[in-house]
Each structure stands twice: as structure tokens, then as C-alpha cells.
Image (cartoon, rainbow, N blue to C red):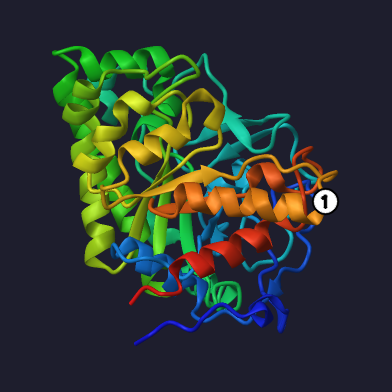
Amino acid sequence: MARPKFDAAELEPTGEFYPPGATFAGMPPAPPQPKLHLPISPKDNIMLLAEGKKPYWFPVGGFMDADVVGFRPRINPDNIANHQIFDGGPTFDYSGYGDIIKSSWFDLEWETTDIGGAMFRPGAPKIPDIMHWEDYISFPNLDEADWEECRVQNLEYLGSDKFNQLGIQCGLWERMMALMDATEAALALIDDDMKPHTHRFLDAYCNFLIDYIRRIKEVCNIHGVVIHEDWAHQRGPFFSAAIASEMLVPYVKRITDFCHANGMLYEIHMCGAVEKLIPCYFEAGVDMWSAIQPLLYDTDAIVKQYKDKQFIWSVTAPPVTPDLDGEQVRQAAKDFVQEFKDCKIMVSYFSMDEGFPGFHPDFQKYVYEFSRIAYQDED
């Protein structure tokens, strides 16, 4: 069936999306996001891309003003500790908390940072010896959580036609760092005596994550999962690709396979200078990659290098300054679409939000227009 040609009326609001957008605790509420005359739903547009087809327009990723609904429900206490409660419940009252919040998942202490969210406090690892990790921690009992309340609370929040994505703050490696501190966690991946015990922990934690995702899927309308991993720091990876392939990829793949078997996409969130580990994403069957530190690597070059892979990349929009006139903004959007139209991307407007120096309010709508035109003759 032929696609409709782009019509400027598509950009005329017909109402507002609920939810308007996710915001971190302490930030002002997100402004209402207009609902447009789109030819297909934002969710279906993303699924086209995931199926290896051309989308109708460049999908928009991220937490705010996006085609994705970030879902980090309070039923996961890590979301409370990280000031990342994105759900349909009432505004969470943090007034009784200080800068340190203890999460009931593994009894970790999280300390508020000045850039949003929180970080576990190092120096007193919960697992001082990976070879005997069962002596130091126990896994949370998910039967104790109120899953019916979670379902009811999020019916409206997850009721739009956007792509609902469950977010999990601590993936395999991040959980190891949180429980062991970074140095000991890295040793647990490479020391031959420790490796069997590390595998036992990762196997148990992988099972726990899959059980959590399964329970959420049973009560909530979700289409995908994103898990934070951060296998690299600002100068390079914490470990080699060979170690990642041996120690972490098998468990990522199990989660990915579970998501695929249940009709969901899997996104790996990976900050740091991680480009040497990108082949591991393909090995694990991951669908998408996102990060918030594009200056640590040449994202554009990476996307073009792997454009023939069935994989979706998050590309940060270029800075388009408010002083540009309308024609200059249109040209910048046209150039951006031309550069990436043969790639599989979701656009992140993280640097385009209000308050950032690169923000221009018209750039996003022009990217929509030119990407719609670029793909309108596809089958």
C-alpha cells in the first residue's frame, strides 16, 4: 500500500499527549507535547525501523519530547533512589530524604549527584569476595511487590500510541560495580579463579532481570526494554571485547532473546568511549544503542560504518542556534536528513532542549518534514 505524501497539516496539533514527558525529580514538569496528524503511530514507525524497513520519518528517542515513553516505575526501588520515577503515579515526595537514599534492592546507598540522578557510594562493597557472593547478598523477592497497583497506576501513562520502554538502571556490569566497586568488579571478570563464581552471580542476576521484565510485561503495556550498562569510561572500555564476549554477552543475549520472544525490542544504554565493544552488541542480538556522551566518539562515522547492520543507532541532533533564520534552520534539517537517510537512526534532541545553547524550536519539525519526504515513496 502506497504511503501518503507529506502534508504540512501533519504538523498541526490535534491535542496533547499523555504523558507530556518524563522529567527527573527536582526538575519542572515537562511542557505538554502536541499530538500531531501523523500517518502512523510513533510506535509503529519505530517498529518499521526495527523490522529493517524504512520508517515514515526519523523516530525521536530519549525521555522528553520523544516518540518513546520512558517508563521507570516506582515498583523498582532503584528508580526511587536514582530520582528517575517515570510512571503514572503521583509526584514522588522526596522531602523526607536527604542526599543519600538506600534502595531495598540489595540494600545499596545511592547519593544524589549535581547532574541529575544518583550514584552508588563506593568504599564499602556489599560483596567483598565474589567467590562467596551468596554469603553477602540475597536477591529481592519480587512476589512482595504490588503488581496490581503498578498495573492500575500506569494504564493511562502507557495508554498513548507511542513506544513504551521499560528502563532498568543497573545492568550486569553496572550492578557488579555497585555491589563490588569498579576495581574488584573488573578483577572478577578477568581472574581465572574468580570467573566461575562471577558466572554464577551473572546467571542469577540475569534470571532476576528477566523475571522482573516478565512481571512488568504481564501487567503493563510495554514494547521495549532499555538497560544501562556503561562498559566504558571517558578514555576507553573497562575491559576488552574478548572479556565482554566471554563474561557478559551470553547474559545480555539471554535478556535480548527473552524480549524478542515476547514481542519487545532491546536497547542497550552505553555511555563512555565504548566503540571498541560495538561488535559485542551484534553478538548479543541487541536492537538499539543509546548514549549521552557523543563527544567521546565519532557517532556519525560509527553509524555509517555499520549502516548495513540491522541495528538502530541513537544520533544526537547537531546544534542549531536560536539566532539562525528560518531558511538556515530548514537547510540544517535538510542536510541532517540527507546525511542519515540511508542509515537506521533515532534522533536524540538531548542537546536541543530548552535551556541548552543549541536549541532552536523549529529544527525538530523540519527534520520530521524532510525525513517524511525522503521516505514517502517507500513501499
Among all residues in the image, which is located at the extreme bottom? 1
Q: Quadrant of the N terminus?
A: bottom left
Q: Nearer the viewer, residue 129 or 360?
A: 360
Residue 338 versus residue 232 in the image, above or below? below
Side (left or right) of 193 relative to 295: left
Q: Nearer the viewer, residue 322 or 222?
A: 322
Q: Nearer the viewer, residue 164 or 251?
A: 164
Q: Position of residue 123 (x, y in %)?
A: 52, 14
Query: What residue is at 34 percent from the left and 19 percent from the top?
Result: 185
Q: Position of residue 175 (x, y in %)?
A: 40, 33
| One can see residue 14 in this view | yes
Query: What residue is at 38 percent from the left and 34 percent from the top?
Result: 302
Three-letter code for the amino acid on which mark 1 is drawn: Asp
Residue 62 versus residue 41 in the image, above or below? above
Where residue 71 sits, quadrant-wise, is: bottom right
| One can see residue 168 in this view | no
Judge the density around disc 1: few (<14), some (14-19), many (≥20) Cα neighbours within 10 Å. Answer: few
Query: What residue is at 25 percent from the left and 20 percent from the top?
Result: 189
Which residue lies under the disc numbered 1? 325
Q: Position of residue 369 (x, y in %)?
A: 60, 67
Q: Position of residue 94 (x, y in %)?
A: 75, 47
Q: Quadrant of the C terminus?
A: bottom left
Side (left or right) of 284 relative to 118: left
Q: Nearer the viewer, residue 286 or 154?
A: 286
Q: How many marks?
A: 1
Q: Dot 1: what SS?
A: loop
Where residue 215 sits, quadrant-wise, is: bottom left
Side (left or right) of 15 relative to 188: right
Query: What residue is at 56 percent from the left and 48 percent from the top?
Result: 336
Side (left or right) of 169 relative to 330: left
Residue 232 versus residue 93 in the image, above or below? above
